[in-house]
Image (cartoon, rainbow, N blue to C red):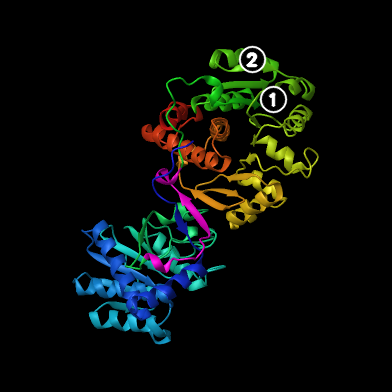
Amino acid sequence: MHIQPSAPPQSLYSAESVRELDRRAMAALDIPSIALMKRAGRAAFAELQRRWPEAKRLQVFSGGGNNGGDGYVIAALAAQKQIPVTVYACVAPDELKGDALEACRFAGREGAHIVTSLLEMNADDGDTVTVDALLGTGFQGSLRENVAAAVERINRAAGPVLAVDIPSGLSADAGAAEQAVRADATVTFIGRKFGLHCGRGPALCGEVVFESLGVPDSVYGDLQPLVRRYDSDSLARLPRRAADSYKNQFGHILIVGGDSGFGGAALMAAESAARAGAGLISLATRPEHLPAALTRCPEVMARPVISGQELEPLLESPDVIAVGPGLGRAPWGEQLLARAGRAQAPLVLDADALNILAGGRVLAGLKRDDWVLTPHVGEAARLLDCDTAEVLADPRAAAIAIQQKFSGVVILKGAGTLIAHAGGVDLLNSGNPGMASGGMGDLLTGVVAALIGQRMDIVEAARLAVWLHGEAGNCAAQDGQRGLLATDLLPWVRRLVD
């Protein structure tokens, strides 16, 4: 039995679903679209003033759609407050239509200065707040020349940048971006957009602030999200241990890996499994790594294996088998994966186990409901026989494709880590850029295996492991992100899992 979460996960929507939410919101609130636009503008302006109360002037970059209309409303509100504001219009006011035109007229009446050429742009300073209201959630493809020039100007701004709903140039559905605004904060409305939290989104959005605009919960009704986003409050946890607990209740984990020269990877996976609470840890590795294993972590039962045949008897007793850290792609690694892949215990595959699997000669065609695959972008591309650009263009689609090809649970690692399973796709934003260093994936492998060994459902184990791993990285990075080592996370994994 596990401790159930105290809050549900957040729903993240596609651009199409957000448009449907807008329609439902106007019907539920019985207001016209311009009124909803003004609510959005007021919410964004309020956040701007809260965040940067000393701002002496604003520059607003507006496009021709509803996002541009939001920008004109912000400009009008700033002018009402006697804050000097200039709107740089990428679509001339006389070409605007509908709500955007009405919002533009509102800004003009209030005294906002509207210009149509970036050549008229004055140099800004740190007291100027820049508002990005160029493109909204409907953007796809490449930026038009004039919009690209505006994005470049925004990214050169000396002061802070606020993005309205989504940074211009970022895909709401995939988190992909060729050229996009880099914001310090993004205020998003009515429905949380998936692209803000995955792919390039976390690097471009800054802090994401959600404003419901007073939309009632009934509006969301039966609308299915694209992804569900989990945090510390929405994760199932391990229960406290009973006073009469014994080690066999908490899983026997076997780590398989560590070819010549790569023994550290397998040992880090073994130690992270131990720190995450596994009852027993075995390590099957090259004979030359045993002295280091005994010295580093004598609690690990290290066994030398030089062939798949020698591994065979070690596969009978573990509750979970993790294969891949330091495994290599030579015949030794292939033999070990071939034997482990047919074992009865649940599996966690990482690193070269995934690369061997992608090659198609070992475990060809195998699909298992009880394994967890943990690729990074490069490994995902090899599993799908495509290039990394295709994975980065739509990581959610890539995670789903891997899950459909191999079954089980797929953890596609990144700034927004995706977990694809038979029930859908989950997302967790945890960790920091300091974790872009060797060995971090090996630690995650050990934590996933340890949680499964403690009788967690594999999907719940994947979610909790990703959060534990990322949060341990955040705690360890309190002393600085640069120079952060994988082993720096181990004490924090132990504290956080309890």
Residue 406 point in image, percent of width and height: 70, 46
Among the 4 quarters of the image, the one containing residue 86:
bottom left
Say which residue appears at 70% left-offset and 42% top-offset. Answer: 368
Residue interval drawn in magenta: 217-235
Q: Quadrant of the C terminus?
A: top left
Say which residue appears at 69% left-offset and 35% top-offset. Answer: 353
For disc 2, the marked residue is 290
Label 2 is placed on what type of residue?
Leu
- Image position of 439 with respect to 112: above or below: above
Say which residue appears at 49% left-offset and 39% top-offset. Answer: 464
Q: Secondary structure at mark 1?
A: loop
Label 1 is placed on what type of residue?
Asp
88 or 392, nearer to the observer? 392
For disc 1, the marked residue is 259
- Image position of 452 with respect to 223: above or below: above
23 or 149, nearer to the observer? 23
- Badge 1 crowding class, 10 Å Cα cut-off, few under 14, some 14 to 19, many 20 or more, is many
- Image position of 262 with respect to 411: above or below: above
139 or 496, nearer to the observer? 496
